[in-house]
Amino acid sequence: MPLGTNWALPIGLPHSGRNINGCHAPEHIQTAKEHQIVRMDDSIRTEVRELRSMVDELKRMQNDTSMVAFSAALRPPPGVSMEYGYGNTGPSTSATTLIFSEVITNIGNGYNRYTGVFTAPKSGVYYFTFTVYCWCNGNQVGAAMYKDGKEILFAWLGAKKGSNEDFATNAITLQLEKGNAVYMRLPEGLQITSRDSSNVTTFSGFLLNPM
C-alpha cells in the first residue's frame, strides 16, 4: 500500500464503528450498555435501602422482646397469726384479689405491687405462671388467674388432714393486647400460705414475642 494514500470508509459503515485497531463498539451498543449499568445501579441502591430497613426492624424487635418480665411474691397479710414467719391468707366467704407485694423483677413496669395487677405495656404473646404454697393442716389450697375479669386458669389441691405442706401450680401462654390486665385471685373457701422473709407463693410472667 503506497504511503500517503488516503482511504475512505466503505459506504454504509458507521463512522462510530471499529477503528483500524478494532477497539470501539458501535454507538448503539455503547448506549445500551450504559443504560444497563444505570438500571443495575438503581437496583443495587434499592436493595441496599431495603436491607437497611430490615436491619432497623430486626434491631427494634430485638429490643422489644427483652423489655417485659416480672416476678412477685406474696407476703402474709397484716394482723394474721404467724408461726415461724408463715401466715395464711383465707379462707374467706368471697373471692379476693391477691396482691403480691414483694417485687423481685419488673422490667417494663407492667406489674403494680399495690394492686397485684399486671397490665400489658405492649401487644404480644406472654407466658404466665404461679405457684401457691399452703401450710394449712387440712384446708384446701388453690388460686385462679384472671384476664380482664374472666377466669382463665386454676390450680387446686385438696389437702388431707395431718398434711402440713402442699403446693399448687399452673402456667399458660396468652396473646394480649396493650392494656389487657392479668392478675391472681383466691377463690372462696381456699387458703394459701406465704412467708415474711422468703418467696414461697409467687406470680410471674414475661413477653415471648411482640406483635
Image (cartoon, rainbow, N blue to C red):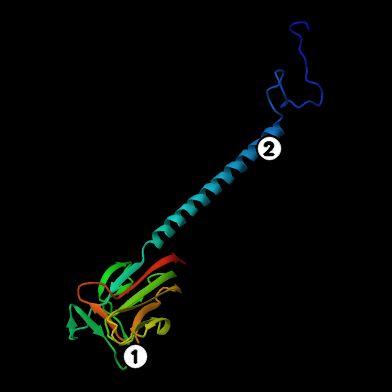
Q: Residues within 10 Å of mark 1 (few under 14, many from 20)?
A: some
Direction bottom: furthest residue: 93
Q: In the displayed structure, would residue 15 be above or below residue 147? A: above
**Could you say which is closer to the camera, residue 88 or residue 105?**
88
**Could you say which is closer to the camera, residue 118 or residue 50?**
118
> In the rendering, at what x and y percent does residue 192 appear?
29, 82
Q: In the displayed structure, would residue 1 be above or below residue 206? A: above
Task: Give the distance between the C-alpha atoms of the residues marked 1 and 2, in whole angstroms.
Answer: 83 Å
Dot 1: element: loop
**Could you say which is closer to the camera, residue 16 or residue 65?**
65
> In the rendering, at what x and y percent does residue 50 appear?
52, 51
Q: In the displayed structure, would residue 49 be above or below residue 153? A: above
Q: Would residue 31 be visible to someone looking at this image?
A: yes
Q: Which mark is residue 32?
A: 2
> In the rendering, at what x and y percent does residue 190 appear?
32, 87
Quarter of the rendering containing residue 31: top right
Q: Which mark is residue 188?
A: 1
Dot 2: element: helix
Q: Quadrant of the N terminus?
A: top right
| Amino acid type shown at disc 1 | Glu
Direction right: furthest residue: 11
